[in-house]
Image (spheres, rainbow, N blue to C red):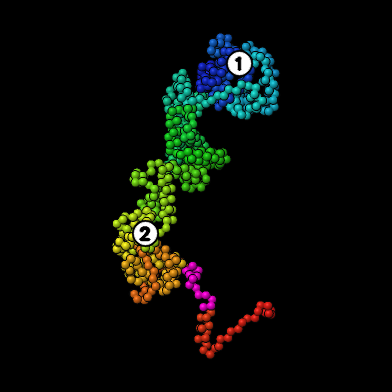
């Protein structure tokens, strides 16, 4: 004789043995005590939560000859024993999944009016949502007005598929998933009653496999006992979870390969991983995880702490799609490995959900350290509104680091848009005037040659003028200016500025500024229009403002520098390099051309004539 399964041997026989369904038990016991049992009930809930067992207990209570005051059947009378042994005529169980046609329901209705030995006749229709529309319509009238001794109990795992006309004729009682600690206690009681040798780790594994279902938990416990221990534990899932958290695809692929070599199916690995990630997501969202054991609740919290909600959502989506694709895939392991590759290498995944996950990770952990164009983080500017204490301690959370990064960008934009100091502005060492910008220029070759350090520029023109009156500023010598102008400054000026200033030269400095001489007043006025760019270039090169005065060249100083050797580090654009103001007008060009022709032909004679009017011209 085959060994009877644990879930059949230890099936609840009375209301007190039902686990995790207190509200349903209370409603039925009160109805039995008060004689107010309805003619039709609809039991709905997940599989293995006690729907059919409760219907059998209700049948016992309605036919028990020694019913207790609390509505509990005695379990010892002949009626209770017959129902427990499946030999009672007072209990008719029908599987609606296989008896779902109109003829099946008509046969049931034809026998409803027949009497039975007991006080009540209970019809249990399991999976009632599988009835065809014709069978449902045939059942409606009898379900609404059955004989007085008949009670219908309809059981289903999908109540939304039961038509409203049937639901409206029944009392709907909902069964819930059973909490993990309740299932663990029940499993220990079964192990003790059956005298099984099972440790706590195996019980926890069985409860996890049961996922809130008492029947599934006892079935898993049966399997563990038959295998002599936990045989289907997937250690690969732990390694994959760690790989997802660390974004390291190597361990994930190694774990999958080892699990497949040990005989695991890719779909089993994917489902186990999906279950772990789902529990972690529920934990991150603050959902109730009471259907899990304490160990699995702790595991879910640990996974949620390692992977952010966006990462969990992304993983659930990708793995769910991979499990669907595995049904038609020639090699399911490829779908699993591709999914893990996308999850562990987000930089290779351009899907919008992957990008959103990367954004959330940045928001959670803060932006990376600011790095300059040379790759050094030490030269990154400090936000202008940062206090000394904040700069020393640094932001302590991702949100603070994000705000600091935004302030840094705003400070840089403000610095770039601030007006440059004028050429006459010089540092005031005695007054200690604060600079207009906190961005310190980098010392350049000119500053090294001059042997000076960068100095703070005055904040106002008035301060600069006062400082000039009282401080003997060390200006670059003429030779230094000529070398810097030819080597670096002139070649880097914008084309429009360069074509105007290339006609001038540096002459001897005066007491307050370096003097740049231009051929005439016209050149001087045109250079004054764009001298701001030259002031900026001088300041950037020498590391401090260099006062520049433009004057008209009187040929009384040293000869102009040779600018032919100036480096051409810029791409010439003839249309850009030519200054339109320097172009000669058409009349001047015409006169020069005529003069050249007359000089080439001494005996020629210039003849001028007026062209005829347009109205008198012939074709």
Local secondary structure at mark 2: helix
Q: Position of residue 4 (x, y in %)?
A: 52, 21
Disc 1 versus disc 2: distance between alpha carbons? 99 Å
User: Is residue 329 shown in magenta?
Assistant: no
Q: Quadrant of residue 201?
A: top left
In the rendered image, the quadrant that contains the C terminus is bottom right
- Say whether residue 394 is left or right of residue 88: left
Tell me if residue 226 can be seen: no
Q: Is residue 415 left or right of residue 9?
A: left
Asked whether 395 or 121 is in front, the reply is: 395
The residue lying at 50 percent from left, 28 percent from top is 211
Magenta stretch holds residue 579 = yes
Q: Is residue 534 above or below residue 283?
A: below
What range is drawn magenta here?
574-589
Residue, disc 1: 37
Q: In the rendering, which numbered label is found on residue 462?
A: 2
Q: Is residue 10 visible?
A: yes
**Left or right: where 415 falls relative to 20:** left
| Residue sitting nearer the eye, 480 or 14 | 480
* Image location of residue 592, percent across then percent down: 51, 81
Q: Main secondary structure of the magenta part?
A: helix
Residue at 53% across / 12% down in the picture?
A: 70
Which one is in front, 470 or 87? 470
Q: Is residue 390 above or below residue 55?
A: below
Viewer-side label of 1, 2: 2
* Residue ID at (44%, 69%): 525
């Amino acid at each position: 004789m085959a060994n009877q399964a644990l879930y059949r041997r230890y099936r609840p026989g009375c209301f007190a043995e039902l686990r995790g369904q207190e509200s349903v038990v209370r409603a039925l016991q009160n109805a039995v005590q008060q004689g107010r049992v309805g003619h039709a009930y609809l039991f709905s809930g997940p599989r293995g939560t006690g729907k059919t067992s409760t219907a059998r207990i209700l049948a016992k209570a309605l036919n028990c000859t020694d019913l207790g005051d609390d509505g509990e059947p005695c379990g010892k009378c002949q009626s209770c024993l017959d129902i427990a042994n499946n030999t009672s005529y007072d209990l008719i169980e029908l599987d609606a999944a296989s008896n779902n046609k109109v003829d099946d329901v008509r046969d049931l209705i034809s026998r409803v009016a027949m009497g039975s030995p007991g006080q009540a006749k209970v019809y249990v229709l399991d999976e009632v949502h599988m009835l065809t529309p014709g069978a449902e319509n045939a059942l409606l009238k009898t379900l609404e007005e059955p004989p007085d001794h008949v009670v219908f109990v309809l059981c289903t795992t999908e109540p939304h598929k039961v038509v409203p006309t049937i639901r409206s004729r029944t009392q709907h009682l909902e069964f819930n998933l059973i909490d993990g600690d309740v299932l663990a206690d029940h499993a220990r009681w079964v192990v003790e009653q059956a005298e099984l040798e099972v440790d706590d780790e195996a019980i926890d594994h069985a409860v996890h496999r049961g996922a809130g279902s008492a029947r599934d938990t006892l079935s898993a416990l049966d399997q563990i006992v038959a295998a002599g221990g936990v045989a289907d534990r997937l250690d690969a899932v732990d390694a994959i979870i760690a790989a997802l958290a660390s974004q390291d695809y190597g361990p994930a692929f190694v774990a999958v390969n080892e699990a497949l070599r040990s005989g695991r199916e890719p779909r089993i690995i994917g489902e186990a991983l999906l279950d772990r990630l789902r529990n972690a997501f529920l934990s991150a969202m603050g959902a109730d995880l009471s259907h899990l054991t304490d160990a699995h609740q702790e595991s879910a919290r640990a996974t949620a702490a390692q992977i952010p909600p966006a990462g969990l959502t992304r993983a659930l989506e990708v793995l769910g799609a991979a499990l669907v694709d595995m049904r038609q895939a020639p090699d399911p392991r490829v779908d699993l490995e591709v999914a893990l590759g996308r999850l562990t290498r987000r930089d290779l995944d351009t899907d919008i959900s992957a990008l959103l996950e990367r954004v959330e990770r940045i928001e959670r952990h803060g932006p990376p350290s600011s790095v300059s164009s040379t790759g050094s983080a030490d030269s990154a500017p400090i936000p202008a509104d940062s206090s000394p204490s904040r700069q020393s301690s640094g932001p302590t959370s991702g949100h603070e680091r994000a705000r600091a990064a935004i302030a840094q960008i705003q400070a840089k934009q403000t610095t770039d848009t601030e007006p440059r100091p004028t050429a006459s502005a010089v540092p005031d060492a005695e007054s200690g005037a604060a600079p207009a910008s906190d961005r310190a220029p980098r010392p350049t070759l000119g500053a090294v040659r001059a042997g000076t350090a960068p100095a703070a520029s005055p904040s106002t023109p008035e301060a600069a003028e006062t400082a000039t009156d009282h401080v003997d500023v060390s200006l670059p010598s003429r030779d230094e200016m000529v070398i810097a102008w030819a080597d670096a400054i002139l070649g880097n000026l914008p084309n429009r500025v360069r074509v105007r200033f290339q006609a001038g030269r540096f002459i001897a400095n005066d007491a307050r500024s370096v003097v740049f001489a231009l051929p005439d007043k016209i050149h001087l006025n045109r250079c004054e229009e764009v001298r701001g760019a030259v002031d900026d270039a001088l300041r950037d090169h020498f590391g401090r403002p260099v006062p520049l005065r433009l004057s008209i060249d009187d040929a009384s100083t040293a000869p102009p520098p040779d600018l032919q050797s100036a480096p051409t580090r810029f791409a010439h654009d003839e249309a850009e390099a030519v200054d339109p103001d320097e172009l000669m007008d058409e009349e001047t060009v015409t006169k020069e051309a005529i003069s050249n022709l007359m000089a080439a032909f001494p005996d020629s004679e210039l003849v001028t004539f007026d062209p005829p009017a347009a109205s008198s011209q012939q074709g």
